[in-house]
Image (cartoon, coloured by chain):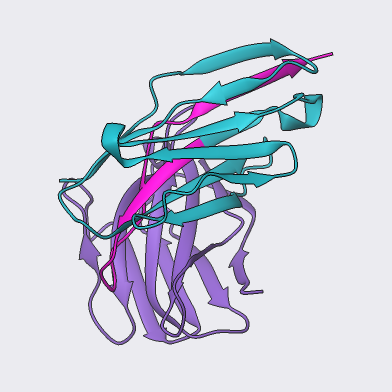
Amino acid sequence: AQKVTQAQTEISVVEKEDVTLDCVYETRDTTYYLFWYKQPPSGELVFLIRRNSFDEQNEISGRYSWNFQKSTSSFNFTITASQVVDSAVYFCALSEDQAGTALIFGKGTTLSVSS
Amino acid sequence: GAVVSQHPSWVICKSGTSVKIECRSLDFQATTMFWYRQFPKQSLMLMATSNEGSKATYEQGVEKDKFLINHASLTLSTLTVTSAHPEDSSFYICSARDRDRYGYTFGSGTRLTVV
């Protein structure tokens, strides 16, 4: 069975601090996809990244970076020099590589960035 | 990019009435639609999966007679909450999977309040 664990329920930082959101996943499949989404107070989900299980290269996009390590089944997300606008709930999600399979979400991490 | 239009954004209804939520894919064919429910400060929980022209598959614990899902075309899926009660108040969000390319496109969500 698939499972996504985001152990950090809430994180509070001050602007310009770096923050890492942890994500640990479980799956029996050898082919799978990992995602991160941002959910601001408005509720809509904002897609951040998708990574397939065969691509362990780390990715950087502006202030965002992701560290994928299959050996520890982790897909952590780091925000560098955080800003107040980064305040939101962040979800890590997993899907199997099969047609018609849904995304399974972690419980989310609420990030609060204060000025 | 792919867009899913979800309506209404919010709705308030009286207990005992029914509410219909629509999700429409605007520029792609949504062969599979997923419906999620999110209670305050909680994660997105998968309610059901529907494939165009087929009956929806409901997750354990989700009442299929209460949450009617119709996916009659490749661009439209609806969720009807029948005989709504206050405990059905939640944020409902759809997610469409494109037949031609891998990815999940989310609607903007519907906030349902039953009074």
What residue lies at 60% left-to-right and 41% top-to-bottom?
A38
Q: Can residue B89 be seen in this view?
A: no
- Left or right, B84 with respect to A72, comes to right
Give the residue furthest to the front.
Answer: A57
Residue A72: horizontal and vertical position, in percent?
Answer: 29, 31
Image quarter hosting the C terminus of chain A = top right
Report if residue B88 lies within the magenta region: no
Report if residue A99 lies within the magenta region: yes
Seen in the picture, residue B97 relative to B17 is either above or below; the reply is below
Residue A57 vs residue B34, the one in the foreground = A57
Rendering quarter of residue B81: bottom left
What residue lies at 79% left-to-right and 18% top-to-bottom?
A16
What residue lies at 46% left-to-right and 31% top-to-bottom?
A108
Seen in the picture, residue A91 relative to A31 is either above or below; the reply is above
- Which chain did the renderer colour cyan? A
Chain B image colour = purple
Residue A110: horizontal and vertical position, in percent?
Answer: 56, 24
Rendering quarter of residue B106: bottom right
Residue range highlighted in magenta = A91-115
Residue B11: horizontal and vertical position, in percent?
Answer: 60, 51
Residue A6 vs residue B51, the one in the foreground = A6
- Left or right, B18 with respect to A80, comes to left
What residue lies at 24% left-to-right and 82% top-to-bottom?
B54
- Left or right, B105 with respect to A62, comes to left
